[in-house]
Image: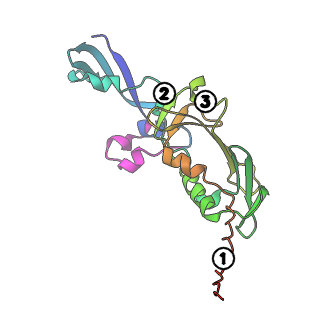
Amino acid sequence: MRSSPVRLHAPEKDRRDPKHETGRSARQSSENTAETKAGEQPFAGIAFGKPEGDNVYARLTDEPFVVAVRRGLLDQISPDPLQWQELSIFKFKPEQIHRLSVTAEKELLLERDQNNQWHWLKGSGEINQANVQSLLNTLSSLRAVRWLGATTPQHGFANPQLVLAFTTSPDNKTSHKLSIGAQNNDGTWCARLDGREGIFAISNSDLNTLRLPLEAQATASPPPTTTPVTSVAP
């Protein structure tokens, strides 16, 4: 049987610890360790063999038993490791973001002061505090809809729609940069993170929040009211 192996992975610690085979808790067995990253060590391998009609034969690589599964399952498994990354992009708290840069048509730059209040480093007028907080809430816990794989010109990063850069330390040395590119056919948007390989998709609702206006819009003054003059006939 010609097979196409698919490896499932777990941290190295779980594979070498004998307690893993004698009832370790689910939390312990899925825990990442300092010496290895999740996904570096396989805990199981599935081999797919000859297709037959709507089914394809499969077995665990260390088991002799062969089963038939729907062929559509194999079609849904991507061989690209970039598409198997964790969907959580950021895991911060909103208050951890110390400085924020938002660039669309122009760059706006804000920073927290010692009283935890935002002020402009680049921008003018009153800051829309509600929009800033909404943006921080979305950005700090951003999740991908799915991973798309390696970067291509079609992803639109030559002219990004939006670029957000922020720091998560008071000395502004711990920085992160998120770029938003082209829109996908399903309404999601291509995104990438500096220093991390691969392109992922974010939802349209998340993008709308990330590009909320941070400058408060000036409220137009109502036109002056005039009191009608009643003419008295002579």
Q: Residue 180 placed where, x, y %? A: 60, 38
Q: Which residue corresponds to the image point at 55% horizontal and 32% vertical from the top-left?
A: 199
The reply to whether residue 40 is visible in this rendering is no
Residue that appears at 60% across and 30% down: 156
For this view, does 219 lie left or right of residue 72? Answer: right
Identified by mark 2, the residue type is: Pro
Of labels 1 and 2, earlier in sequence is: 2
Q: Earlier in the sequence, mark 3 or mark 2?
A: 2
The one nearer the camera, 189 or 66, is 189
Query: Which quarter of the image is occupied by the N terminus?
Result: top left
- Which type of secondary structure does the marked residue at label 2 adopt? helix
| Mark number, residue 156 | 3
Residue at figure coordinates x 24%, y 18% from the top left: 57
Give the magenta range.
Answer: 16-33
Asked if the residues shown at circle 1 and circle 2 are in contact, with their CB atoms under 8 angstroms apart, the answer is no
- Answer left or right for 160 relative to 19: right
Q: Dot 1 corresponds to which residue?
A: 225
**Eye-nearest disc, 1 or 2:** 1
Nearer mark to the viewer, of 1 and 3: 1
Q: What residue sits right under mark 2 in the picture?
A: 81
Q: Is residue 93 above or below residue 187?
A: below
Residue 106 on the magenta segment:
no
